[in-house]
Image (cartoon, rainbow, N blue to C red):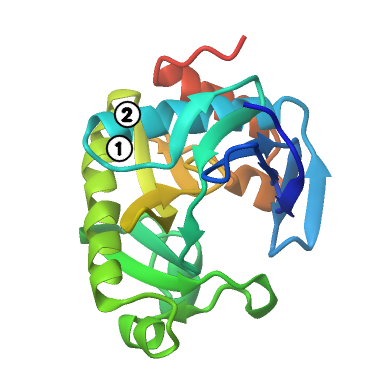
Amino acid sequence: MQKLNELYRGKAKTVFTTENPEYLILQFRDDTSAFDGERIEQLARKGMVNNKFNYFIMEKLAAAGIPTQMEKLLSDNECLVKKLAMIPVECVVRNLAAGSLVRRLGVEEGLELNPPTFELFLKNDALHDPMVNESHAIAFGWATAEQLAEMKRLTLAVNNVLKPLFAAGGMLLVDYKLEFGVFNGEIVLGDEFSPDGCRLWDIATRTKLDKDRFRQGLGGVVEAYEEVGKRLGMQFD
């Protein structure tokens, strides 16, 4: 399937149309951003690593019965996906306290959350992705009650698949965010799952192996992403 026109350019990915109106091509770039795009850098190999990482994870989720937009890997930094009508609400699950939860509530980083928390955030960089609730989403027409219920069910189902997967590789799945859209009337997991959108710590040392390495100036960002992938059995070369 051929790449045609640029449809959308995000902080780290570019979306292109194809000759089939139901499918798009996602191109993963080497751009790395933080703080709602205020800081952007180029990191060699990052686009390739995240593209292959995302494909691997989406295949695992699809095998577990979770509908995803992934169709196939096209190249080192491109994949073919279904065109979704995206819902502008992000779903976040937290297994351990970190990031904004720590800042908002003053709890200790690394506190185990049992059961995991589930949160909704409006996808809006200009507003810094504010936290919202189901009533907001329904009242403002971002999603229906039925769509929200299915998004929550699928988000927690993802946790049941990925938490043990990462644990088997000696890692803690601290938290993650997911985006969903509608395809032929069905709620489908879209966007990506990579270390850009989740937190992963070494289970023994609690070394950070995700985008916090970029946010916090720890260095070795792409090397950490590749380490995560290799622990899961991925090949990047």
The residue where tag 1 is placed is 162
Instruction: Kindly indicate the quadrant of the structure image that contains residue 42.
Output: top right
Q: Residue at x 28, y 45 (%)?
A: 158
In percent of width and height, residue 202 lies at 42, 33
In percent of width and height, residue 90 lies at 45, 64
Q: Amino acid at mark 2?
A: Lys
Looking at marks 2 and 1 on the same chain, the residue that comes earlier in the sequence is marked by 2
Instruction: Decide if residue 47 is on the left or right side of residue 116.
Output: right
Please tell me whether residue 124 is drawn above or below residue 30 in the rendered image: below
Instruction: Kindly indicate the quadrant of the structure image that contains residue 203.
Output: top left
Please tell me whether residue 88 is drawn above or below residue 133 in the rendered image: above
The reply to whether discs 2 and 1 touch (Cβ–Cβ < 8 Å) is yes
In percent of width and height, residue 173 lies at 36, 43
Secondary structure under the numbered disc 1 in the rendered image = helix
Distance Cα–Cα, label 2 vs label 1: 8 Å
Q: Residue furthest left?
A: 115
> Which labelled disc corresponds to residue 60?
2
Mark 2 or mark 1, whichever is nearer to me: 2
Q: Residue at x 76, y 44 (%)?
A: 5
Q: Quadrant of the C terminus?
A: top right
Q: Nearer the viewer, residue 107 or 14?
A: 14
Q: Nearer the viewer, residue 182 or 165?
A: 182
Secondary structure under the numbered disc 2 in the rendered image = helix
Q: Residue at x 71, y 54 (%)?
A: 8
